[in-house]
Amino acid sequence: MTAENASAQFATADAGRLDECGSKTVQLAPLRVRITNEDAAAFANATGGSREAGRVPLTFPACWLALPSVRTLIADSIGGGFLPIHEAQNFNYERELEVNREYILGIEACRTQAPPRLTLRMSIASPEGVICAQLEAVLRIVPTGLGLSQ
């Protein structure tokens, strides 16, 4: 299996297909990510979690939402005058993630209108295409109030 289809768990044959969100999905090209021991330790420290040396915190993949291409996807999906607020997340592991190992991150986003939400589905696979984890993050889309008359 190639890196391009390693994220196939949430990949779509047609990036514009309708899904269970009832809207079109947008899929990023697969991203290569790596978890360093330093990154895992910093994440555990920042989130107040304990960490065994050499182990990746279970919620570590949430930090990949801050990658530039993912931030752009989120900003483009919600538009101006709105703010994404973290509402929920779900982590489903097939196998534990390891430090100093490369992974392929697949991300698909869909937006719902009522209530306004952006759902990001992520798959993490080994370079060989073995699915390690599936994640879902739900962002509530709220108006910032900018431009509203007082």
Image (cartoon, grey):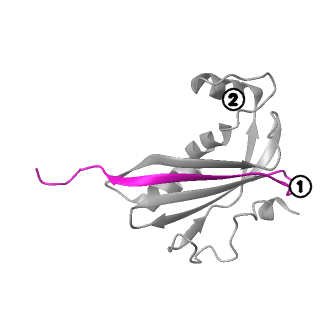
Task: State the image quarter where residue 13 is shown.
Answer: bottom right
Q: Is residue 147 left or right of residue 24?
A: left
Residue positioned 89% across, 55% down in the render? 128
Residue positioned 70% across, 67% down in the render? 11
User: What residue sits right under mark 1 in the picture?
Assistant: 128
Whole-number angstrom distance, CA of label 2 to CA of label 1: 23 Å
Task: State the image quarter where residue 8 is shown.
Answer: bottom right
Cβ–Cβ under 8 Å for marks 2 and 1: no
**Bounds of the magenta segment:** 125-150
Task: State the image quarter where residue 75 is shown.
Answer: bottom left
Residue positioned 58% across, 46% down in the render? 65
Mark linked to residue 64: none
| Label 1: few (<14), some (14–19) or many (≥20) C-alpha neighbours in 10 Å | few
The answer to whether residue 145 is magenta is: yes
- Is residue 100 shown above or below 110? above
User: What residue sits right under mark 2 in the picture?
Assistant: 39
Q: Position of residue 82 (x, y in %)?
A: 34, 53
The answer to whether residue 70 is magenta is: no
- Is residue 27 shown above or below 145? below
Q: Is residue 10 left or right of residue 53?
A: left
Q: If you read the primary sequence from the N terminus, does the residue marked by circle 2 or circle 1 appear first? A: 2
Residue positioned 86% across, 55% down in the render? 130
Q: Position of residue 149 (x, y in %)?
A: 12, 54
Mark 1 lies on a secondary structure that is: loop
- Is residue 124 shown above or below 23? above
Q: How many marks?
A: 2
Residue type pointed to by label 1: Glu
Mark 2 lies on a secondary structure that is: helix
Q: Position of residue 107 (x, y in %)?
A: 64, 58
Looking at the figure, which quarter contains the N terminus? bottom right
Residue type pointed to by label 2: Asp
